[in-house]
Image: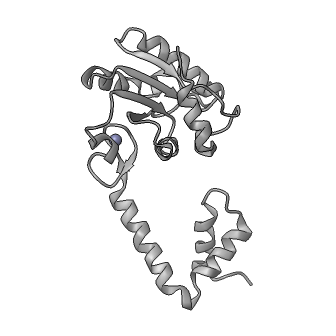
C-alpha cells in the first residue's frame, strides 16, 4: 500500500526544498505529524504565513524587509558608498564584518549568457538612478569571482564610466567560484581593504 494521499502530498512539499531528497522529505513528514510536535509545527505554520505576508523586497535596494524600506536604507548615518551585490546573503555576510558603513544594492541578476540573461536584464538603471539622486561617490562591486561576476563587473564599469563616480572591485582573496556568503569574516574584510579601482 501507499501512504495516504495527504501524507504523500506533505512529503512532496518537503521535497521541493533545496537539498532535501525523498528520504529526508519522508523523515520530515513523519516528524511534522508527531503528536508531541503540534505546538512546534503550528508555530512553523504561523511564522511561514507571517513571512509570506510581511516579507518583501526593499523598494530601494532589493534586500528583504518587513518594513516599507529596509533598516540599512533608512539609516541616514550610512556613507555615500554603494556596494553592488548578487544577493541578500552577501549583504548579511558583509554586515557581520562591520567593516562596511555604506549602502547596498542587489542587482536583479548577474549577466549569464548560458541562462539567456543579458545586460538589459540586470536592473542597472536603478543603480544609476541611486547614484544620481543620492550623491553616491563610490561604487564597490562585490560579486562572486566567477564568469558571471566578471562579465557583469566589466559591463557595469563601462556604463558607470559616464557617471561622476569612482568604481572599485573588491580584492579577491575569495576562492574562485565561491559565494560571498561562505567566505569567512577576515577574507571579507580583506576583500574590502584591498579593493581596486576599475
Ligand atoms: Zn533597502
Percent coordinates x, y for residue 52 in the rendering: 39, 60
Q: Residue at x 34, y 19 (%)?
A: 137
Query: Is 11 left, or right, of 124 in this rendering?
Result: right
Q: Position of residue 39 (x, y in %)?
A: 47, 85
Quadrant location of the N terminus?
Answer: bottom right
Which residue is painted at 47% across and 38% down in the image? 99
Closer to the camera, 22 or 63? 63
Q: Residue furthest bottom?
A: 35
Q: In x, y percent, where is residue 11?
A: 63, 72
Above-or-below relation of 75 to 124: below
Figure quarter occupied by ligand 1? top left
Asked whether the viewer can see residue 143, the reply is: no
Residue occupying the point 57% across, 84% down: 33
**Observer-nearest residue: 147 or 121?**
147
Specify the color scheme.
Answer: one colour
Residue 104 locus on image (x, y percent): 40, 35
Above/below status of 24 relative to 95: below
Q: Is residue 129 left or right of residue 149?
A: left
How many numbered discs sit on the rendered protein?
0
Q: Residue at x 44, y 77 (%)?
A: 43
Amino acid at each position: 500500500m501507499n501512504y495516504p494521499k495527504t501524507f504523500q502530498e506533505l512529503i512532496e512539499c518537503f521535497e521541493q526544498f533545496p537539498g532535501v531528497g525523498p528520504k529526508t522529505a519522508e523523515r520530515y513528514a513523519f516528524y511534522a505529524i508527531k503528536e508531541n510536535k503540534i505546538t512546534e509545527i503550528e508555530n512553523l505554520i504561523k511564522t511561514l504565513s507571517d513571512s509570506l505576508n510581511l516579507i518583501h523586497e526593499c523598494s530601494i535596494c532589493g534586500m528583504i524587509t518587513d518594513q516599507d524600506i529596509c533598516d540599512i536604507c533608512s539609516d541616514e548615518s550610512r556613507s555615500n558608498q554603494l556596494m553592488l551585490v548578487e544577493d541578500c546573503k552577501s549583504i548579511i555576510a558583509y554586515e557581520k564584518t562591520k567593516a562596511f558603513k555604506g549602502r547596498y544594492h542587489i542587482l536583479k541578476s548577474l549577466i549569464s549568457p548560458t541562462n539567456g540573461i543579458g545586460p538589459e536584464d540586470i536592473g542597472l538603471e536603478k543603480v544609476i538612478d541611486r547614484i544620481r539622486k543620492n550623491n553616491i561617490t563610490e561604487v564597490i562591486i562585490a560579486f562572486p569571482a566567477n564568469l558571471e561576476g566578471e562579465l557583469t563587473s566589466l559591463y557595469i564599469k563601462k556604463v558607470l564610466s559616464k557617471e561622476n563616480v569612482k568604481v572599485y572591485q573588491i580584492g579577491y582573496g575569495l576562492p574562485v567560484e565561491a559565494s560571498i556568503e561562505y567566505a569567512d569574516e577576515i577574507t571579507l574584510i580583506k576583500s574590502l581593504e584591498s579593493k581596486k579601482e576599475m
